[in-house]
């Protein structure tokens, strides 16, 4: 096969992979380091399939891929791009825990938004960025469907909330008390409690490390790949 045909075939394979999974391996750089691009978009899907009209991130696709990345000698770092409205708590936390436990260097970039359970995913990497217009919505756990009004239900809600706040606070600089204050803010969201943080505000609160775009995110990831033992 000629070099030109091989390149065309590789590009077609990349296009197909992006269309199916939103993932791509970046390997054309001077350092000869392979970066896996992972996109968290739309709604994070849990155990139930969402509408075919919805943009979703399927955790059953993401988790095996992260396991393969950890075991791969060809992948040197992971770049996570987020533009998500949130979604299933269990699925979101599973993705966040997998990212946090990777031995490979990881960097996240919030584009558009990383709301609700997208917050733990955004902070799970070794370093995090948000674009100036990016947003993060911090709010308490919600539940759809029938809720039984007994003490055990409220205990269960608190347990879920503590898991989320505990993870977030362990992976960024915000305190638990301040995070809970943002969750319970009543004056910002018209139909809910919570807080919207835009760009620099998320950095100021200690949730995201730095304001920046794709250039800074890729540059930082290359720095971490040169010093893989560096941690957050």
Image: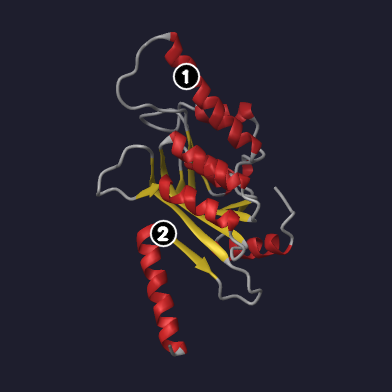
Total marks shown come to 2
Residue nearer the viewer, 8 or 53: 8
Q: Is residue 185 above or below residue 46?
A: above
Residue 51: image location, x then y, percent: 25, 44
Residue 154: image location, x then y, percent: 45, 15
Residue 143 tag number: none
Single out the residue that lies furthest toward the bottom.
Answer: 2
Residue located at (40% from left, 28% from top): 142
19 relative to 103 in the view: left or right: left
87 relative to 167 in the view: left or right: left
Which colour style is shown? secondary structure
Quarter of the rendering occupied by the N terminus: bottom left
Query: What element does badge 1 sit on?
Result: helix
Single out the residue that lies furthest toward the top.
Answer: 150
Between the residue at mark 1 and the residue at mark 2, the CA separation in whole angstroms equals 34 Å
Give the residue at mark 1. 156
| Residue 192 picture quarter | top left
70 relative to 229 in the view: left or right: left
Asked if labels 2 and 1 touch by Cβ distance under 8 angstroms, the answer is no
Give the residue at mark 2. 22
Residue located at (72% from left, 64% from top): 226
Residue located at (50% from left, 26% from top): 160
Query: What element does badge 2 sit on?
Result: loop
Residue located at (53% from left, 55% from top): 68
Residue nearer the viewer, 79 or 215: 79
């Amino acid at each position: 096969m000629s070099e030109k045909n091989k390149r065309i075939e590789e590009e077609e394979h990349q296009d197909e992979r992006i269309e199916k999974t939103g993932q791509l391996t970046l390997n054309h750089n001077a350092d000869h380091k392979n970066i896996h691009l992972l996109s968290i978009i739309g709604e994070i899907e849990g155990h139930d399939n969402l509408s075919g009209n919805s943009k979703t991130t399927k955790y059953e696709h993401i988790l095996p891929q992260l396991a393969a990345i950890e075991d791969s000698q060809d992948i040197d770092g992971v770049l996570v791009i987020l533009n998500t409205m949130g979604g299933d708590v269990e699925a979101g936390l599973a993705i966040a825990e997998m990212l946090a436990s990777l031995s490979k260097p990881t960097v996240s970039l919030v584009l558009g938004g990383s709301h609700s359970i997208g917050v733990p995913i955004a902070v799970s990497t070794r370093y995090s960025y948000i674009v100036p217009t990016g947003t993060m919505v911090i709010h308490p756990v919600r539940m759809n469907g029938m809720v039984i009004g007994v003490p055990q239900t409220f205990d269960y809600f608190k347990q879920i909330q503590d898991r989320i706040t505990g993870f977030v606070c362990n992976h960024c600089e915000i305190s638990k008390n301040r995070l809970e204050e943002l969750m319970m803010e009543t004056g910002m969201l018209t139909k809910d409690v919570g807080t919207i943080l835009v760009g620099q505000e998320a950095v100021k609160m200690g949730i995201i490390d730095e304001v920046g775009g794709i250039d800074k995110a890729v540059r930082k990831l290359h720095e971490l790949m040169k010093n893989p033992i560096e941690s957050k």
